[in-house]
Image: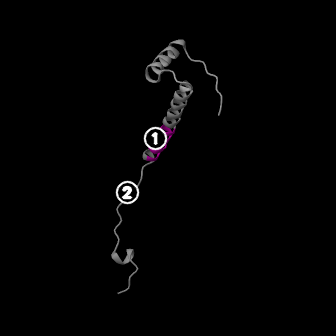
Amino acid sequence: MGIMTISISDEVEKKFRAIIREQNSMKKGILGKVIQEAIALWIEKQKQEEIAKRQLQILKKGYNFSIKSYKREDLHDRKC
């Protein structure tokens, strides 16, 4: 398990602790658990944004959806 030391504004910390207190009544280890969940959500959001950027680049390149016409014989290798 990694250890991180972070600094956040007093206002954010007070709001954070108040919400934790209301929801979880300050159980042992809850702060670390909630922060871990927040970081995991942030990581997932970053991944989704990267996926969206890549997909937009693909859309901007464009794709040729030309319709090709095939005969049955071309698609099936059957000899009658």
Q: Position of residue 53 (x, y in %)?
A: 48, 40
Q: In percent of the image, x 48 and y 39: which residue is there? A: 48
- Image quadrant where residue 1 sits: top right
Q: Look at mark 2 in the image and give the residue it sits on.
A: 65
Specify whether residue 21 is painted magenta.
no
Q: Amino acid at mark 1?
A: Ala
Q: In percent of the image, x 50 and y 18: which residue is there? A: 17
- Give the magenta-colored segment's residue range: 47-58
Q: Look at mark 1 in the image and give the residue it sits on.
A: 52
Q: Amino acid at mark 2?
A: Phe
Q: Secondary structure at mark 1?
A: helix
Q: Secondary structure at mark 2?
A: loop
- Image quadrant where residue 75 sits: bottom left
Q: Nearer the viewer, residue 63 or 33?
A: 33
Characterize the magenta stretch by its predominant secondary structure: helix
Dot placed on the residue nearer the N-terminal end, 1 or 2: 1
Q: Coloured how?
A: one colour
- Frontmost of labels 1 and 2 is 1
